[in-house]
Image: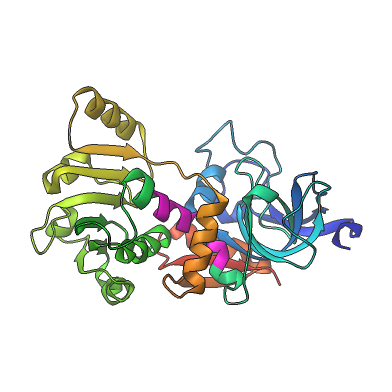
Amino acid sequence: MASDAKLMQVVWYDSYGDGASGLKHVEAPVPTPKNDEVLIKVEVSSINPIDFKIQGGMLRPAAPSKFPFIPVTDIAGEVVELGSDVKKFKAGDKVVAKLQDMSGGGLAEYAVAKETLTVSLVPEVSAADAAPLVTAGLTALQALTESAGLKLDKSEPEVNVLVTAASGGVGHYAVQLAKLGNMHVTATCGSRNFDFVKGLGADEVIDYKTPEGAAVISPSGKKYDAVVNCTTGISWSTFEPQLGETGKVVDLTPGAGTFANFALKKLTFSKKTVVPFLVNCRCENLEYLVNLVKEKKVKTVIDSKFSFSKAEDAWAKSMSGHAVGKIIVEHC
C-alpha cells in the first residue's frame, strides 16, 4: 500500500520568486487521505500559468498557505487509498482530480484530492489527455457557457466569438468547444500557429502582431457577440468598437481595471460589458469534458512532455509563454 512508504519524491519551493531555479527535488512524507479524500499515485500533472504566478507572489499572503510548498493542482493517476467516507472510488481506479489551490501538492509521487473534485477516467482517455482539462478545459468551458451564456449545441442562431491567444492552453480548448455550438470563431495567435488554430476549427485567424490583429478586427468585418480573452494587454477601448450591440468580453486574467470597468458598466446599464472570470471546479463539468475527449469531439494538444526529474524545465517552458497547447509532467 502506498501509504506504507514513509517518504516520496516531491518538487517544492520554499520562498517567493526565483522561477524554475527556485524548485527543489526533495523527499517528503506521503500524505494521508482525510475521510473525504483519496490518495492518488500521480501519473501526469499539468502546469498552468497560475502556478508560477503564485510562486511570484500574485496571491501573497493568501497563497501559498505555507512554505515549503509543493505546487500544481491538476493531476491524473491511480487511486491507491481511500478516506473512510469515500464511496465513489476504489483502489486501482484511474482518475483525474483538482487539488486545493492553497495547498497544492501536484508535483509529487502521491497527492490527496477531495472525492468531490475527483472524476473517473475511461480507458479511451489517458492521464495525459485528462490532467490538462482540469484548469484550462474548465476555464474555456465556463467562460463560454456561464460567463458568456452561450450554448454548445446548434439550437440557437449563429453568434460571433473571438478567442484571443487561441493556440495556448485555454485558447485551444475554447476554439474547439465554441465550434460544438453554432458559433463563428475568430481567433488570434502568432502567424506560425495559423494552421494549428485553423485545424482546431477556427473560421478566421488573425496575427496579433499586425495592426489589424492588435485592434482585434475580424477579417470579415463581423462584430463579436462574445470574447474569450485569454491574454493580457488588450484594453477595453480596443475591444469595445469590435463588439456587437450586446457584446461581452470575458476576461480570464482580470486586473483592477477589469473589475472597475465591470462595475461601471453595471452602473451605467451598458449593453456592452466586460466580465471578470474565476474558474470553479465542478465534477459535472469535468466529467462532461472527459466525455467529449472520449467521443473525440475535443482533443488535448500537448506542447511538450517533461519527466518528473526535469519538472523545472517544464516550469521554465510554461513561464516563457510560448506553449502551443499544454505542458505536462510525466511522473512514471
Q: Is residue 120 left or right of residue 219?
A: right
What's the residue at 76%, 53% (across, down)?
87
Instruction: State whether residue 270 appears in this view.
Output: yes
- Residue 19 in the image, given as x and y percentages of width and height: 55, 51
Q: Is residue 134 magenta?
A: yes
Q: Is residue 161 magenta?
A: no
- Residue 59 in the image, given as x and y percentages of width and height: 53, 36
Question: Is residue 40 or residue 269 the one in the foreground?
Answer: 269
What's the residue at 70%, 40% (across, down)?
67
Instruction: State whether residue 134 appears in this view.
Output: no
Question: Is residue 283 or residue 26 the one in the foreground?
Answer: 283
Question: Is residue 66 or residue 31 the one in the foreground?
Answer: 31
Counting the numbered discs, the total is 0
What's the residue at 17%, 59% (across, down)?
213
Please state, as top left, top right, bottom left or bottom right, where the N terminus lies in the image: bottom right
Is residue 20 placed above or below 54 in the rendered structure? below
Question: Is residue 148 or residue 156 the one in the foreground?
Answer: 156
Q: Is residue 50 left or right of residue 243?
A: right
- Residue 296 in the image, given as x and y percentages of width and height: 45, 75
Q: Is residue 295 left or right of residue 210?
A: right
Which quarter of the picture shows residue 165? bottom left
Q: Does the magenta stretch mainly form a helix, a strand or a loop? A: helix
Please state, as top left, top right, bottom left or bottom right, where the C terminus lies in the image: bottom right
- Residue 48 in the image, given as x and y percentages of width and height: 51, 55
Q: Is residue 279 left or right of residue 166?
A: right
Extreme residue in the top direction: 267
Extreme residue in the left direction: 221
Please provide the residue range marked out in magenta.
130-142
